[in-house]
Image (tube, grey):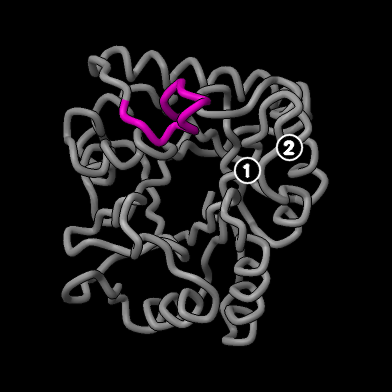
Amino acid sequence: MQIDLNSDLGEAYGPWTMGPDAELLSLVTSANVACGGHAGDPETMYRTLCLARARGVTVGAHPGYADPLGFGRRVIPMAPAEITRMVAAQIGALQGIARLAGTRVAYVKAHGALANLAAESAEVAEALVAALPPDLPLLAISGTEQEKAARRAGHKVFSEIFADRAYLPDGRLVPRSRSDAMLHGAAAVDRLLGFLKTGLMPTTEAPIRLQAQSICIHGDSPEALDLARALRARLMAEGVTLAPFA
């Protein structure tokens, strides 16, 4: 079995730092790099992309609502066409910095509230897909409207599951406002290994069947580094090959 391990990185802004990016880039195979919406500025993008290039890590654009104070986790009311233009601008920004860093953007994955809204709203999912360059696949939340919109448009799509987030029965993530939204430590690793063996993801009710080519660890989580180390070690011990999906 082969699977990708990704993390949301480059989420600093100016002098404000977020997450152990350098250490995580030694563990993951793909990095979703913030591109100026919820976080990230030109210097942060450049540093993150250079580190990823040096570690041989594939990079993707990680656009979100232009809401640094809310870290992109608040829904900003926008028309679908506005969402398309916002996402296109952020992808283009990261592509420009990637050229300077000697690497290339290989895919797109939406962040935070935008990703969650696109998971449940076909209209928002279609607006997201409309922003994608033809050569960049979408990394979508497995089993949601994101996947469906990409397929309807004939756009290449890969699917991801989350190592550290709990699931609702419809495949969406449990809202972060709930106390049971996050999984920790051995419980997260055990659930992930169980999913890879069965294809069934436990939810707040009955398990559901999902597909996945990538596993996400949130880089801003205080436990991100420990979880990434434990998960990588366990996957390799189980004979799973870690490699980028894109």
Do callouts 1 and 2 mark residues in contact (Cβ within 8 Å)? yes
Whether residue 87 is visible, yes or no, is yes
* Residue identified by numbered label 1: 9
The residue nearer to you, when weighing 226 against 124, is 226
Task: Identify the residue at horizontal 36%, vertical 31% (top origin).
Answer: 74
- Farthest right residue in view: 54
| SS for dot 1 | strand
Assess disc 1: are there few (<14), some (14-19) or many (≥20) residues with their C-alpha within 10 Å of its C-alpha.
many
Q: Amino acid at mark 2?
A: Thr
- Rendered position, 80 above or below 113: above
Where residue 190 sits: x, y (%)?
Answer: 46, 82
Task: Identify the residue at horizontal 35%, vertical 33% (top origin).
Answer: 114
- Rendered position, 242 above or below 174: below
Task: Identify the residue at horizontal 26%, vertical 37% (top origin).
Answer: 117
- Which of the marked residues, 1 or 2, is nearer the chain's N terminus? 1
The residue nearer to you, when weighing 175 against 42, is 175
Q: CA distance from mark 1 to mark 2?
A: 7 Å
Provide the major secondary structure of the magenta segment: loop
Where residue 149 sits: x, y (%)?
Answer: 23, 37
Task: Identify the residue at horizontal 49%, vertical 15% (top origin).
Answer: 89
* Residue identified by numbered label 2: 48
Q: In the drawing, does residue 141 fall left or right of residue 153?
A: right
- Farthest bottom residue in view: 238
**Magenta segment:** 64-75
Asked if residue 180 lies in the magenta stretch, the reply is no
Residue 46: image tag: none
